[in-house]
Amino acid sequence: MSRTCTIYRRAHFAASHRYWLPELSEAENLARFGSHARFPGHGHNYVLEVGLTGEVDEYGMVLNLSQVKQVIRERVIQELNFAYLNQVWPEFAQTLPTTEFIAYTIWQRLADALPLSSVRLYEDPQLWAEYRGEAMQAYLTVATHFSAAHRLALDHLSLEENTAIYGLCARPHGHGHNYGLEITVKGSIDPRTGMIVDLAALQRVIEEQVVKPLDHTFLNKDVPYFAQVVPTAENIALYVQRLLTLPLRELGVQLHRVRLQESPNNSSEVYGEFPLEELGAATAATTYPASEGKRDPSEVEPLAAGRAEPAAYAGSG
């Protein structure tokens, strides 16, 4: 029987940084990085989460956490806490200290001392990056939210039949949620900018493609897709995956994960991109980023029927 286990250790540090390339003019830096280029920089309260994988030993541990804490403190926290990141490590002289590149560099600093499986770095509660030792590939997550109402019911069933499946969620006039949404993309870290994607462009795509069209709507009535598809948390997550797959490819990254938090107790996740052939974008499979065959993903026909109906829906609590 395998005794492999992954453990996580958190640490915190406060540091400042600036996005500025000396080969660009001030106007060019401001155009490229916005307020992040302003002198003398800006700061964050970073949260670091280090994942460690190994066999559970005779003492019931993968590693002694006191030793893990010491390694992280000596190699990372003592050097980065209350530091100006652009000048603290030589790696940041060549590559800007973005969240994703800081995570990558921390991995390099710890790799010979700890059995790393992941390094996750939170810049703030709405933005974090993760590195998993996959060459220069990193993951970046943006968290946002929208409010919407929905009703869970199939048109061909009676109220009693829908209630048997969906419970209170089948009530005729619907109900609403403050949905939490996390979008994770993956891509290669640029050796100069330290970024896998232009963050402002990523946030803009999520806002324009998902948040604005869904926020303060009654999904069944205001979003044509959900006139034919029951807007469960699962189907909403799949719809977001459909909406974002091509626009994110055009930014040079790939969609990795959609997480939808419907309530404190209910959430759903989907991984990967929506099948390109179902978006009518076969050319995008060989063009990276996609530049041809574009169409509005919301205009694509709903997913084919065939999903089994649940015996009973747990409800929204």
Image (cartoon, helix red, strand yellow):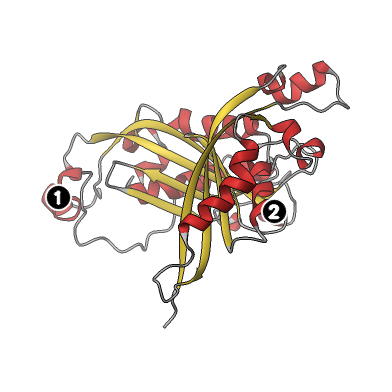
| Figure disc tally | 2
Looking at the image, which is closer to me, 137 or 283?
Answer: 137
Q: Is residue 228 left or right of residue 137?
A: left
> In this rendering, is residue 67 above or below 104?
below
The x, y position of residue 233, in whole percent, is 34, 47
User: Which mark, residue 108?
Assistant: 2
Residue closer to the observer: 178 or 50: 50
Circle 2 residues within 10 Å: few <14, some 14–19, many ≥20: few
The location of residue 62, given as percent across then percent down, is 47, 67
Q: Which mark is residue 163?
A: 1
* Above or below for 116 versus 233: below
Q: Residue at x 16, y 40 (%)?
A: 171
**Among numbered discs 1 and 2, the one appearing first in the sequence:** 2
Q: Residue at x 63, y 37 (%)?
A: 80
Q: What is the three-letter code of the residue carrying label 1? A: Thr
CA separation in Å, label 1 and label 2: 54 Å
Q: Which of the pair 134/186 is nearer the observer? A: 134
Q: Is residue 81 shown left or right of residue 173?
A: right
Q: Residue furthest left?
A: 160
Q: Secondary structure at mark 2?
A: helix
